[in-house]
Image (spheres, rainbow, N blue to C red):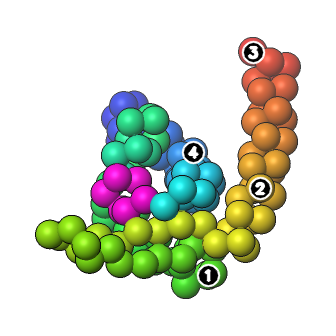
């Protein structure tokens, strides 16, 4: 595997878990899937539809998201919003994330 491919693969692994946390934070306001995809990509969290849509369905099945269809426009869209349980879980994951970032930052600084 070329160095560039290896780096890309490892970076993808680093980002994988962040998508869940980002979704739980962003979906405090209802969004439909494509808008969420655009928001994530615009924020620098590279994710594609083949990853995001199954993730949204999984989070909904776990009770962390709710959804409803908006059929008022010409094209029906499914809107997702974080549930009360999802909000609690998101807050706990955000704390975990902050602790992890602090720890990794310290390890990086100590081992430069």
Q: In which quarter of the image is residue 52?
A: bottom left
Residue 54 vs 106, above or below: the answer is below
Label 1 SS: loop
Percent x, y of residue 53:
37, 68
Cα–Cα gap, marks 2 and 3? 32 Å
Q: Residue furthest bottom?
A: 61
Residue 62, placed above or below residue 5: below
Q: Earlier in the sequence, mark 4 or mark 3?
A: 4
Question: Is-magenta flag for residue 34?
Answer: yes
Tell me the residue at 34%/46% (across/down). 38
Q: Which residue bears the numbered disc 1?
A: 62
Viewer-proximal residue, 87 or 10?
87
Tell me if residue 7 comes above or below residue 49 in the rendering. above
Residue count near mark 4 (Cα–Cα under 10 Å), binned few <14, some 14–19, many ≥20: few
Label 4 to label 1: alpha-carbon separation? 23 Å
Rendering coords of residue 9 (x, y %): 43, 45
Callout 1 crowding tier (Cα within 10 Å): few <14, some 14–19, many ≥20: few
Q: Decide if residue 4 is in sight here.
A: yes
- Name the residue that disc number 2 marks: 91
Mark with earlier residue (4, 1): 4
Q: Distance between the residues labelled 2 and 4?
A: 20 Å
Q: Which residue is drawn at 64% across and 72% down?
A: 83
Per the rendered image, the range of residues in magenta is 31-36
* Residue picked out by circle 3: 112
> Mark 4–mark 3 contact, CB under 8 Å?
no
Q: How far apart are marks 4 and 3 (CA)?
A: 20 Å
Q: Nearer the viewer, mark 2 or mark 3?
A: 2
Q: Which mark is residue 14?
A: 4
């Amino acid at each position: 595997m070329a160095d560039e491919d290896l780096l890309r693969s490892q970076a993808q692994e680093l980002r994988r878990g962040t998508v869940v946390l980002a979704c739980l934070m962003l979906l405090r306001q209802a969004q439909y899937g494509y808008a969420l995809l655009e928001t994530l990509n615009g924020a620098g969290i590279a994710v594609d539809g083949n990853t995001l849509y199954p993730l949204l369905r999984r989070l909904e099945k776990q009770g962390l998201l709710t959804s409803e269809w908006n059929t008022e426009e010409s094209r029906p869209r499914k809107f997702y919003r974080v549930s009360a349980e999802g909000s609690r879980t998101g807050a706990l994951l955000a704390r975990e994330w902050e602790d992890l970032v602090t720890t990794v930052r310290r390890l990086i600084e100590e081992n430069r």
